[in-house]
Structure formats: structure tokens, C-alpha cells
Image (cartoon, grey):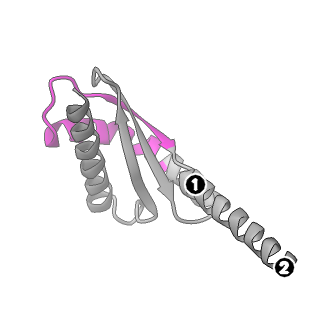
Amino acid sequence: MAKRKIRVNELLKREISDLLHTRYRSDAVYITITGVDVSPDLRTGIVLYSVLGDENRKIEARQFLARIQDEIARELPRRVILKYFPKLTYKYDDSLEQGHRVIELLDELNEKTESIE
């Protein structure tokens, strides 16, 4: 079952990304689908996305995805055939920002260590 879940996650990620960047090209150019996590029973799922830009871009992306969520929910089952299609919710993925912050902190620590030596 775990392998199937992984395959479904990747398939949905690819199809959502393709749909966004073909049908909604101008609006979705700064949105990246970073992952999809469906429940083991494939009834619900979370779509993780990141945004290039500032806080305003994040707000625009959240509003844009909320606006087209129903269209995506209608189109995806045509592209991906599943017995039960998950109800997807969209969540901002801040892991890239957190990773960048960790790297900044490590660089600062490294500079302080070098200056002491």
C-alpha cells in the first residue's frame, strides 16, 4: 500500500503542476507544487506549494488556488483514474524558507567561529 500511495502522490503532483502551468500559465508562473500527501485510504490529500516572491505573492497564490480549486477538482479525475479521488486542500510549504534560514544561521556560526580562531 505504501508504494501505491507514493505513486499516487507523485502522479497528482505532476498532473496538478502540469495543469497549473498549461491552463493557468500567466497566473501560476510563480507557484511551484512541492508535494502531495494523500491519506492511506485516498479520500483526502494535501497539496503543498511554494511561491517565488514576497508576502504579497503568497497571498495572491493562496487566493488564486482557492479560486481555481473546484476547476482542478473537476479536471484531475479526467487525467488520473482512481477508484476514490481525494478531496484536496492546498497548504503553503515553508520548508524552503526554513532551510534557507538554517543555512544563514550556520553561516553566521561559521563566521563567528572563524573570527575567534
Between disc 1 and disc 2, whose residue precedes?
1
Q: Are the residues at dot 1 and dot 2 in contact (C-beta closer than 8 Å)?
A: no
Q: Is residue 89 left or right of residue 95?
A: left
Q: Quadrant of the C terminus?
A: bottom right
Count of all numbered marks drawn on residues in the image? 2
Q: Residue at x 39, y 66 (%)?
A: 26
87 part of magenta stretch: yes
Rendered view: 40 above or below 24: above
Name the residue tied to disc 1. 58
From the top left corner, tell me how far across and down residue 72 is, in percent: 30, 42
From the top left corner, tell me how far across and down residue 64 is, in percent: 47, 50
Viewer-side residue, 101 vs 70: 101
- Circle 2: residue type: Ser
Say which element carries label 2. Answer: helix
Viewer-side residue, 95 vs 55: 95
The residue at the far front in this view is: 117
Question: In the picture, residue 77 is in which quadrant?
Answer: top left
Name the residue tied to disc 2. 115
- Magenta-highlighted residues: 64-91
From the top left corner, tell me how far across and down residue 45 is, in percent: 37, 31
